[in-house]
Structures are given as C-alpha cells and as structure tokens.
Image (cartoon, rainbow, N blue to C red):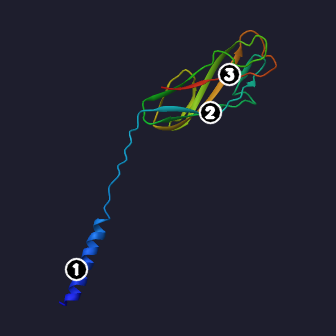
C-alpha cells in the first residue's frame, strides 16, 4: 500500500475514534412514587328552590344539584356527605332548618341516589358526585331574602 494512502487512512481512522469518543452520553433517571390519595374538587354550585312555604330543595322545580369531583389513586376510599348545621347567609328572622342531603355518583363509581350519610366505596379514578340538599324550616315559613349554606363532600 502506498505510504501516503496508509497515512491518510490512519488519520481518518484516528479522527473517527476521537469523534466517537467525544459523543459520550449518560442516562438521567426519573422516578415517581404515588401515595394513596383522595382529593375532592368543587365543580358547580347547587341552587335551592322553594318547595312550598316550609322547604327549600335543590330537587324542586327551579333548583339545581351541586357537583364535586373526587380523584383517587387507589381503591379503598369511601364518599359520603356532611349536612350543614345552619345557613351561613340568611335574611333576618327565624331561619333554623333541618337539612337532609342525597347524592349519586358517575364516572369511576356509578350509584343511584343515596342518603348523604351513607358511605359508598370508590374505585380508582375520577368520580363525579351530584349532590342534592333539602332544608325544612323548623318554626316558620322561609322569609324573603338570600340563603346560603354548604354541604361537605367527604372522601376518607
């Protein structure tokens, strides 16, 4: 082989080794640990409508159910509701009431209408909780004005 050709081939081989050596890499690891979690997110408010003079009800004509979404990373959680103790906003006058609630679920777990205090097991995923509330006056008719209260959706 010609000396010049030999030097040229040797030089090309050397530069190829150098460029290969400069293209070193390293893997960057990524890990995740997901704990058992259950979180509740408000979706839309409910609306109480008059049902006679002594009751306000989200299931009455003009009323609307409230909605929350529950996100679970595993099974083993339950959903239920905590009824309000009273109104947070109400007009002047005697507005003491007895509250009852019901809910149904869709999505990760699907159930028909259930009493608010009843615990329902949840599956992993997203479950929508559709909440209805009824308030019955204990002493008199509901006066004219704005009323507001909160039902707590519990995931435990």
Nearer mark to the viewer, of 2 and 3:
3
Residue closest to the far right: 144
The furthest residue to the left: 1
Q: In this view, does 71 lie above or below 133?
A: below
Mark 3 / mark 1, whichever is N-terminal: 1
Secondary structure of the residue carrying tag 3 is loop
Where is residue 140 shown, x and y percent of the image?
77, 11
Residue 10 place in picture, x, y as percent? 22, 80
> Distance from label 2 to label 3 (Cα)?
15 Å
Depth check: 88 or 54 in front?
Answer: 88
Q: Is mark 1 on a helix, strand or loop?
A: helix
Residue at the far bottom: name it.
2
In terms of image quadrants, where is residue 41? top right
- Mark 1 crowd level (few <14, some 14–19, many ≥20, 10 Å Cα): few
Res 15 → quadrant: bottom left
In this rendering, the answer to whether 95 lies above or below 13 is above
Whole-Å distance between the Cαs marked 3 and 1? Answer: 85 Å
Element class at badge 2: strand
Q: Which percent across, then down, holds residue 142?
A: 78, 16
Q: Is tag 1's residue or tag 2's residue first in the polypeptide sequence?
A: 1
User: Which numbered disc, 3 or 1, marks the residue closer to the eye?
Assistant: 1
Q: Which of the marked residues, 2 or 3, is nearer the chain's N terminus? A: 2
**Circle 1 sits on which residue?**
10
**Closest to the observer, 56 or 71:** 71
How far is the residue under mark 1 from the one under mark 2? Answer: 75 Å
Which residue is label 3 attached to? 149
Q: Mark 2 points at which residue?
A: 67
């Amino acid at each position: 082989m010609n000396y010049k050709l030999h030097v040229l081939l040797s030089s090309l081989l050397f530069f190829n080794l150098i460029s290969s050596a400069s293209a070193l890499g390293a893997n960057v690891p990524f890990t995740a640990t997901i704990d058992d979690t259950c979180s509740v997110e408000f979706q839309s408010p409910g609306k109480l409508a008059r049902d006679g003079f002594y009751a306000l009800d989200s299931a009455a004509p003009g009323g609307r159910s409230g909605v929350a979404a529950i996100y679970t990373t595993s099974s083993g959680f339950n959903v239920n509701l905590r009824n309000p103790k009273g109104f947070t906003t109400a007009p002047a006058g005697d507005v003491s009431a007895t509250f009852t609630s019901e809910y149904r679920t869709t999505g990760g777990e699907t159930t028909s209408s259930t009493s608010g205090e009843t615990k329902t097991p949840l599956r992993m995923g997203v479950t929508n909780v559709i909440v209805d509330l009824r308030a019955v006056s204990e002493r008199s008719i509901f006066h004219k004005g704005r009323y507001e209260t909160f039902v707590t959706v519990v995931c435990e």
